[in-house]
Image: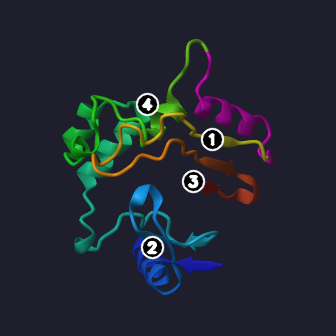
Amino acid sequence: MNRFWDIDQVQRWALANLQEEGNEVAPRGLNTRELLAQTFTIENPRARCLSDAARGWSLPAAIGELAWHLAASDDLQFISYYIPRWSELSDSSHIAGSCYGKRIFDRTGTHASQWQRLVGLLRSDRNSRRAILRCPTSNCCSTLRRKTVPVRPHCSSLCAISVYTQSFTCAATM
């Protein structure tokens, strides 16, 4: 398994691998490259903020986006305060495609959120393989788009969480 000290090393490795081995794909008509089934370990998980100035990473934007997700929000005004570019990507006052926090943390009626159910499951069975966060939506990406790019009708993602062997593991599929 690939091991790195911090997130900057992960980014350099990922970008080099994308250029050398990345598969060319064009989701929603946007040309890009992807790597499938990659795994790595960050030796120092507290070193998780990118420090490469060319990347344009912003701590206030990251904190704002975290707050937006944890608030289970899909409100465009909330997120565009921290990341103004979001206003260019939506045709309405709500975001449908990228607000996974709403689908994970929002309580529907009297039902617990996905997150509350996942935590309860892992507390009762720390070796469970059923601890899954699922973020599907029938209109995913319908309001998060550039006006000139065709919209893909469906998308879905899964995140399997496990905490066995004294470590936190997340396997994401999108």
**Quadrant of res 49:** bottom left
Marked residue nearer the N-terminal end (3 or 1): 1
Marked residue nearer the N-terminal end (2 or 3): 2
**Above-or-below relation of 100 to 168:** above
Can you tell which mark lies on residue 72?
Answer: 4
* The residue stretch that appears in magenta: 111-128
* Inter-mark Cα distance, 2 to 4: 29 Å
- Residue at the spot 26% in from the left edge and 44% down from the top edge: 86
User: What percent of the width, then of the height, locates residue 7?
Assistant: 43, 70
Q: Name the kind of residue labelled 3 in the image.
A: Met
Q: Nearer the viewer, residue 17 or 53?
A: 17
Q: Are marks 2 and 3 in contact (CB under 8 Å)?
A: no
**Quadrant of res 164:** bottom right
Residue at numbered disc 2: 6
Can you tell which mark lies on residue 133?
Answer: 1
* Inter-mark Cα distance, 2 to 1: 26 Å
- Residue at the spot 43% in from the left edge and 42% down from the top edge: 141
Can you tell which mark lies on residue 174?
Answer: 3
Please tell me whether mark 1 sits on a helix, a strand or a loop: strand
Q: Are marks 1 and 4 in contact (CB under 8 Å)?
A: no
Marked residue nearer the N-terminal end (2 or 4): 2
Can you tell which mark lies on residue 62?
Answer: none
